[in-house]
């Protein structure tokens, strides 16, 4: 089972989050994670077509997606959209910003709408919010994994609980994709 993680990262913080998502995917037996950085400029369309799920990730800038992820969504995916090649693929999202809230929900909503327009099935986060900074989902997101990074290097931030939240999302997507794939033959 293949899970593609299509992401953008301006300073390395969201890349670190994407790597945590991939780690969570790999916890599920038989699941393989493929990281795809949109900044690389080359989109492996065969990988995306073969994927059972696609997880999108972006930093949140001014309450919205990064320009590179938005460009990927708007300019690159038209052939997949016109023929509905991603129909019934599992989808999810994650985001990171400097501020605790940072209007990250706007980015996740944009990702979910994009997935819906492609006929994908969105998987949210199944964790209750916590007020303890050491707990998963400390930011309180339901639509996807949220992280907060201080103005520090990616080796310092996002903090461990945000990375555990991202890994949990990756594992959840892989489990849902496996269930969906098993039921597809029925």
Image: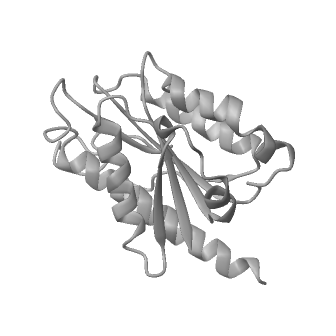
| Residue 44 or residue 20, whichever sits in front | 44
Q: Where is 10 relative to 126, above or below? A: above
Q: Residue at x 45, y 36 (%)?
A: 8
Q: Residue furthest bottom?
A: 186
- Indicate the quadrant containing the N terminus: top left, top right, bottom left or bottom right: bottom right
| Residue 186 or residue 44, whichever sits in front | 44
Task: Say whether residue 129 is visible.
Answer: no
185 displayed left or right of 167? right
84 displayed left or right of 61? right
Residue 99: image quadrant is top left
Residue 70: % across, % down: 58, 28
Residue 141: % across, % down: 41, 41
| Residue 108 or residue 71, whichever sits in front | 71
Q: Where is 176 relative to 162, above or below? A: below
Q: Residue at x 58, y 54 (%)?
A: 54
Residue 13: % across, % down: 28, 37
Residue 182: % across, % down: 66, 81
């Amino acid at each position: 089972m293949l899970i593609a993680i299509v992401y953008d990262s301006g300073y390395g913080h969201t890349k670190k989050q994407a790597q945590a998502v991939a780690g969570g995917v790999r916890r599920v037996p038989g699941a393989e994670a493929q990281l795809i950085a949109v900044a690389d400029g080359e989109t492996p369309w065969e990988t995306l077509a073969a994927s059972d799920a696609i997880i999108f990730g972006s930093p949140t800038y001014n309450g919205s997606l990064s320009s590179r992820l938005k460009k990927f969504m708007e300019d690159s995916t038209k052939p997949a959209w016109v023929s509905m090649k991603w129909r019934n693929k599992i989808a999810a999202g994650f985001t990171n910003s400097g501020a605790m809230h940072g209007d990250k929900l706007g980015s996740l909503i944009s990702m979910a709408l994009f997935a819906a327009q492609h006929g994908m099935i969105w998987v949210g986060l199944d964790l209750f919010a916590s007020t303890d900074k050491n707990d998963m989902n400390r930011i309180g997101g339901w639509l996807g994994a949220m992280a907060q990074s201080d103005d520090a290097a990616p080796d310092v931030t996002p903090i461990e609980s945000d990375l555990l939240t991202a890994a949990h999302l990756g594992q959840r997507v892989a489990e849902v994709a496996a269930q969906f794939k098993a039921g597809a033959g029925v």
